[in-house]
Amino acid sequence: MSTSAFPEISPGLPVEIGRIDKELGKLWETSDDTKTRASLINLVIYTESAAQVAANTELISRIASHHACRAILIFANPSAAEANASAWISAHCHNAGKGARQICSEQITFQLDGDTASAVPNVVFSHLDSDLPLCFWWQGDLPSAPDENLWSWVDRLIFDSQTWSDPAVQFARVCEISHLSRSRTILCDLNWTRLLTARFALANVFDHAAALPALRDVKKLTIRHTKQARTTAILLAGWLAAQLGWALESVLGRHAFRDKRNAEVGFDLIEADGACISVVEILSASATITLRRESNAEFFHASIRPAAGPDVTQMLPAGRDSLREHLLMELSRGGVHPLYAKALDLIRPVFSHD
Amino acid sequence: MSDSQAPVFSNPLREGLLSRALPAPCSLVIFGATGDLTHRKLVPALYNLNADGNLPPALSVVGFARRDKTDEQFRTELLDAAQKFSRQKINTELWDGFASRIAYHRSAFDDIEGYHALARRLDEMDKTQGTRGNRLFYLAAGPDQFETILNNLRESGLNVAPEGGWARVIVEKPFGTDLPSAVALNTLVENAFPERDTYRIDHYLGKETAQNIMVLRFANAIFEHLWNSRYVDHVQITASEPLGVEGRAGYYDKSGAMRDMVQNHLLQLLCLTAMEPPTDLSADAIRDEKVKVLRSLRKIGSDEVAKYTVRAQYSAGNVNGKRVAAYRDEENIPPESETETYVALEIHVENWRWSGVPFYMRVGKRLPKAATEIALHFKGAPPILFNQSGDATQALDDNVLVIRIQPDEGVSLRMSAKLPGTSLRIEPVKMDFHYGTSFGRPTPEAYERLLLDAMAGDATLFARRDEVEEAWKFVDAIRAGWESRNDKLAFYSAGTWGPSEADALIERTGAAWRRL
């Protein structure tokens, strides 16, 4: 055992890696009767940033109160000179209802230095809560040489394409991992989850009779987004295009869509401060539909301005723009994401030209 | 496909976002808009649906009531109610947007002019608010008003939607007080609305755990093989509450536990427990199977009520540490009332699956705690190896699968395990699944789900006419038996688990009521 690389938090009780299960057992034997261990999933979080360990521990604590899990947090430091593996165990408990009863989730934290960083598959396999799904959140860039042993075991691969510096390369790796797992692994891009409320809101707005016809003759799509959220905006455009049957046309780095009638649909991405996606504007001959969100607002303001007839406005839930909310949403919704694959297939060339 | 079932939308952006039918734009007209149900349940449910983005984009809510008030006064009253009873905190801006869709329509229920004026108002809303000629009428008034309202809806033509739209009616229980009155009510409803547009609310069916019964049974292969008379010894269905009549004295004293709870909620739970797998998940496929169960119930005639039923009333006692009055001493209850506040039944479902398996049912007020659950008691292991008579150390408790409907929704399974140690001692242990522990997020109120379903045209969680009438046939036979024999009521002290007669009823077959 060694000291941790993350002195700002206590990762829990230091344990020998070979005794983790025994020590976890003792943890529950010595706790009082008001505590109940619960687990619905194995949630593995992998990071190569020591600074992320504290944030991840905090995140697990918050997630666990909504989604009981066995959390395995791995901090890998492959550039460390010395090979060393250390582990700590802890529990996150929260009150269940009004009584004294507490529901607890276990967390095992690993620090893998030097060569031991390659032991990730073994560390994961040997500490899973059996028969429960494995959700693996890989933070940062995906590995250039995916390990088939590992990925074939993962039920849900979670990543956040918004954090990637080179999305074109990273999306290619995602596709490779999906191929290695024979498409059994469900790809869960938190950047896609981040768009869920916007997609719901847009779908909701177009349920309105004054807006629906506009989908047939869209002239222009404009999305305002923060600098950080460019991939988010592109994915949103990909979803709209895929659902509306548009084809992507890229000429000399300029992108536009062609609708089903082969008419051009203009496509503007505009960087702006504010919410991650602050404006989505869909312009057509019959109406202009706008979805706006102020920074940190929990609701979208939608407006339908038909060419004829009165304007319609609506407020729609936007959720909270936080990683915790997105992860919770992803874990709670479950299921596969066929629309993501469809949208990504269509829009991937845009990333290559970025 | 009928007009009312035809899909209204072909919005390609909806693909993959929802796994349930989409609620259609409509005008929701609430009769009895100033009443308790509207304030406590309907408006909070509508607000929560709106906050979650689940309401259709064009929805108008029209409150129909007799009292004189403006739209603004009505909205202010509803805001007060939503602040008190909503599961989500009220966002002022969101409420303002929602409230702008609420209107008040003043009219007496028996004034046909009020309905004509309503029709004109709804037509106008169709034009200005995009409600597409769809009308959902919610009868939240007292049942004594149903006839007047339904007749006037028909008289004014409001029961028929403009072309391309639909007109539906939601009817709150009680669905009659016996079979003849239920048939009369159903006929009355049918004269105005076809069965496919009639939605009879039983809010128990909107509860997550009630919906989960089918998932538990038919999505888990391990249970279905055991779900029959070969393995199940008996089933217990319990609905207990510590509350008394709580301001419903007038209604409750006429109704009693049998009509208030057994005819609807408990028989619905029995149906979900005993039914065969439906051919698909459509409303009619599921309701067909439930009706088959009701038709299979062995009728309890007057010569059998003493054997298979117990009716009782609470006397004074202690509940939650407080002294409480006897039922007959409650406000507005006649001192000589013979109304039952407790019923215990032994029911037999006479079909291949359940032949010989008693379903014990108990429901009561002023019992020690609030609990609604279904418990399947499995037959014991054969007396070989373990479970031998005369050897107390090896006696086994039966396996029990419990589906908790409320509170603390979940499922548990009792089984036997060896006590650690050198000697062989066997003790019961419990595997327990709690919704709250596992999913840790608030479940929507039953009314939220049911309102959405009615707007979407999904009648799965609503009772069909034949279900209601079959349930009354069963209940009426028992009530007729009680009346003809003039049996004396049993009594139990408030705060206890019912009369000793109920214990005797179940102990006859060697079983015992579960300790909850």
Image: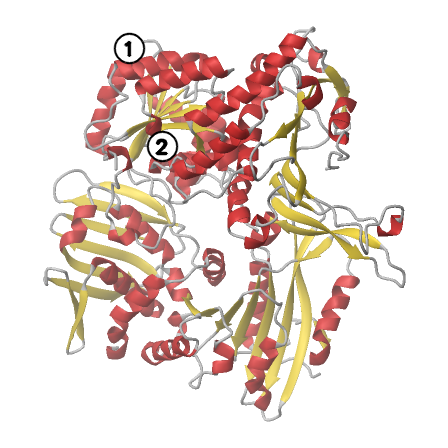
Secondary element under disc 1, as helix, strand or loop, is: helix
Graded by Cα atoms within 10 Å as few (under 14), some (14 to 19) or many (20 or more), the crowding at tag 2 reads many
Secondary element under disc 2, as helix, strand or loop, is: helix
Q: Which amino acid type is shown beneath numbered disc 1?
A: Ile
Mark 2, chain letter? Answer: B
Q: Residue B39: image x %, image y %? A: 47, 26
Say which residue label 2 marks: B99
Q: Quadrant of the C terminus of chain B?
A: top right
Residue B329 in the image: above or below residue B471: above
Which mark identifies residue B112?
A: 1
Q: Are marks 2 and 1 on the same chain?
A: yes
Q: Residue B338: image x %, image y %? A: 67, 10
Which residue is rendered at x = 88% and y = 48% of the image? B392
- What distance separates the C-alpha of mark 2 from that of mark 1? 27 Å
Closer to the camera in the image, A219 or B480: B480
From the image, state whether disc 2 or disc 1 is nearer to you: 1
Q: Which amino acid type is shown beneath numbered disc 2?
A: Ala
Q: Residue B75: image x %, image y %? A: 39, 27
- Whether residue A10 is visible to the viewer of this picture, yes or no, is yes
Q: Quadrant of the N terminus of chain B?
A: top left
